[in-house]
Image: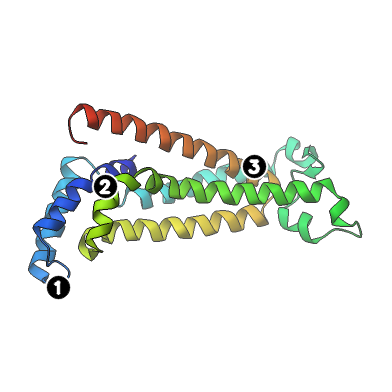
Amino acid sequence: MDQQKMQNLQPQIAKLQEKYPNSNTNQAEKARLSQEQMALYKRNKINPMGQILTLIIQFPVFICVWSGLEGSAALSSGSMLNLRLSDTIRETLFNVSGTWYLNSMGWWTALILFLLMAGVQVLAMMLPKLLANAKTKKISKMGKNPAANEANKQGRIMMIVMLVFTIFMGFMLPAAMGIYWLIGGIISMLQTAITQAIMSRSAKKRGKI
């Protein structure tokens, strides 16, 4: 939610950048820009570190889901298109046990599941920025501003780390976790799109866009 709010504030942040055009080189202007930006976030009830906190909170959820799946009878005996849910994608793709992988439906299922899971996770991370491209054209023309973009950069770095972690774990853990992350990524994209649409409509009614 905070990410969508921050994207909707980009036009106002652009005005602040215009107000302090020398903030890249002038420390006093840089400090004032940072103060006004933080005040803007506070007025709109936005926590710039909210994205990072959200990602950290997801760790206990991940551990609970993983623990639940490990003890599940459905996981130990279940399968999907010849792919055992208890087998890891890594094992399925590289340990073919003498069977030619091109004739194994389970091999193809594992490959497609991994590619879909990775692709959906990437799209889920990029979607908020893609939806806000029209609002950030003005900022992209103005050039980079370290003071204004510091929080966003930290959030992006953390999200990239989490993305790499998720894709790696989806490759190493049972296929059931890959399915979990695939469905979770799809739900995240739907939530982002719906939230962005609602907030954009509300902003238009208030005459901010």
The correct choice, above or below, for 112 with respect to 147 in the image is: above
Kind of residue at disc 1: Thr
Q: Residue furthest top?
A: 205
Residue visible at 25% across and 44% down?
A: 46
**Residue 26 x/y as whole percent:** 11, 71
In this image, 79 relative to 13: left or right? right
Kind of residue at disc 3: Ile
Q: Which residue is mark 1?
A: 25
Q: Which residue is mark 3?
A: 179
Q: Secondary structure at mark 1?
A: loop
Q: Earlier in the sequence, mark 2 or mark 1?
A: 1
Contact? badges 3 and 1 (CB < 8 Å): no
**Residue 182 x/y as whole percent:** 59, 42
**Residue 100 x/y as whole percent:** 89, 57
The correct choice, above or below, for 16 with respect to 26 in the image is: above
- Distance from label 2 to label 1 (Cα)? 26 Å
Q: Earlier in the sequence, mark 2 or mark 3?
A: 2
Nearer to me, 13 or 179: 13
In this image, 174 relative to 122: left or right? right
Q: Secondary structure at mark 3?
A: helix
Q: Which residue is mark 2?
A: 47
Residue visible at 26% across and 42% down?
A: 8
Kind of residue at disc 2: Asn
The correct choice, above or below, for 21 with respect to 48 in the image is: below
Nearer to me, 26 or 84: 26
Circle 1 packing at 10 Å, graded few (<14), some (14-19), many (20+), is few
